Image (cartoon, rainbow, N blue to C red):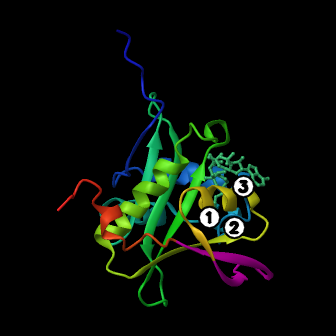
Amino acid sequence: MTELTPAYRVRRIEPGEWRELRALRLEALRDAPTAFSITYAASEALPDDAWRAQAAEAATGASTALFVAVGPDGSWLGTAGAAPIPDVPDHAHVHGVYVTPAHRGRSGPAADLVAAAVAFARTHIDVGHLTLGVHESNARAQAFYLRVGFVPTGLEVPYPLDPAERLRILGYPGFRDRAAARPTDTS
Ligand SMILES: CC(C)(COP(=O)(O)OP(=O)(O)OC[C@H]1O[C@@H](n2cnc3c(N)ncnc32)[C@H](O)[C@@H]1OP(=O)(O)O)[C@@H](O)C(=O)NCCC(=O)NCCS
């Protein structure tokens, strides 16, 4: 019987993978400039040590993590992360969600990446609420997030790079659903 090679594997990033992180982040900022709250120019100007520190924290942090989808040839296809939201008590967010254009669509890694980030948040971040912010014009990301279990909260906040634009805040209602967190626990 022929074994099918999986199209990708989702795993947490490793501490030394700052060059890969930098390359995919800069690609993401070129591809989707309003999808993140930092500019390409600001990211490109970061010194290598800043990328080293980001990768190390994403790889080893107790309550923050970044997951990567890796193709059969080792190439990075996308990322998603989870972390507490600074200054918003009892809330964590999913962030850094990006899939390289050739790997988008239902057979791509986007849903598995977000699932990995949600699972990490459930088990490692001691908060009651999981949310994310998505730019008002990003219809594809909004449709994707609704499909994987996020819902509109009705809240909007100014988009940090242009306060005239809005970020829609989506919530994840199943976040503290213990049955969903432990699907095999039948007791
Ligand atoms: C957001 C992202 C990770 C989603 O991954 P993806 O592989 O594109 O997601 P999918 O294709 O599985 O789902 C997207 C859905 O939006 C739909 N869609 C595509 N274009 C759309 C549009 N212009 N308007 C509305 N819906 C759209 C697709 O049909 C699909 O829905 P379906 O599965 O019900 O058919 C990916 O598009 C991406 O990396 N975008 C750039 C970065 C980004 O925006 N990140 C989010 C930051 S908050």
Q: Relative to 152, is 49 above or below?
A: above
The amino acid sitting under disc 1 is Ser
Mark 2 vs ligand 1: CB below 8 Å: no
Picture residue at 75% right of the left edge, 60% below the top: 139
Q: Residues within 10 Å of mark 3 (few under 14, many from 20)?
A: few
Front-lying residue, 183 or 122: 183
- Determine whether label 2 and label 1 are within 8 Å by CB: yes
Q: Relative to 48, is 159 above or below?
A: below
Q: Secondary structure at mark 1?
A: helix
Give coordinates of residue 40: x percent, y percent. Answer: 69, 62
Question: Magenta span covers which residues?
Answer: 153-171
Q: Relative to 101, is 154 above or below?
A: below
The amino acid sitting under disc 2 is Thr
Picture residue at 61% right of the left edge, 38% below the top: 103
Q: Residues within 10 Å of mark 1 (few under 14, many from 20)?
A: some
Residue on which disc 2 sits = 39
Residue on which disc 3 sits = 140
Front-lying residue, 30 or 175: 175
Give coordinates of residue 168: x percent, y percent. Answer: 68, 76
